[in-house]
Amino acid sequence: MPGCSDFESLNSQTILGRSLIIRPYSNSRKPNVIPSKQIVVGQFVENLLPAELIRDDPAFKRDGLPDDLYAGHPGVITDATPQHVLVDWVGLEDMYISFATGTSVYYLGGPIHGMSVISEEYYTQRSERIRMGLPPLP
């Protein structure tokens, strides 16, 4: 795509003939996609996609646990199969987003989009915010 940054060209898709750019949450740093060879069980990651309501049914509500998978939400990879990478998202471990809904590489050896590697320190800080009932990022 002419005139696009490297990040945008990595995160563009054509759906129904329209070119779309997948943009992560607004932040001054450039987020990274994760090369498939770096997807390993136990890796700390963050969600780069916009917030999504997960606990949309009152039966799923839990005191002290988040209802949303936030932009910047921390998680840990639990299954590194490139066709179906699973992540335990903090506070959402009991929900389908952690044990059933996975993401995959777009092509063999390609990167995983929608997630970025984070440090254990960021994982811990963001997890604490979620446990306090706050979004992971200020």
Image (cartoon, grey):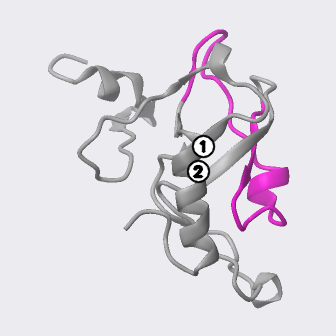
Considering the numbered disc 2 on the image, is that residue within a helix, a strand or a loop? helix
Drawn side of residue 11 relative to residue 30, left or right: right
In the picture, which quadrant includes the C terminus? bottom left
Neighbor class of circle 1 (other Cα within 10 Å; few <14, some 14-19, many 20+) is some
- CB under 8 Å between callouts 2 and 1? yes
Does residue 93 belong to the magenta stretch?
Answer: yes
Q: Which residue lies at the image location 40% right of the left edge and 23% below the top edge? A: 10
Q: Which mark is residue 123?
A: 2
Question: Does 59 sit above or below residue 28?
Answer: below
Q: Position of residue 54 (x, y in %)?
A: 67, 69
> Does residue 68 appear in the picture of this structure?
no
Kindly identify the amino acid type of the residue bearing the numbered disc 2.
Tyr
Magenta segment: 84-112
Q: Amino acid at mark 1?
A: Glu
Instruction: Indicate the position of residue 20 as horizontal and vertical percent values.
Output: 35, 38
Determine which of the numbered discs, if any, sits on residue 120 in the image.
Answer: 1
Does residue 50 show up magenta in the picture? no
Q: Residue at x 48, y 54 (%)?
A: 72
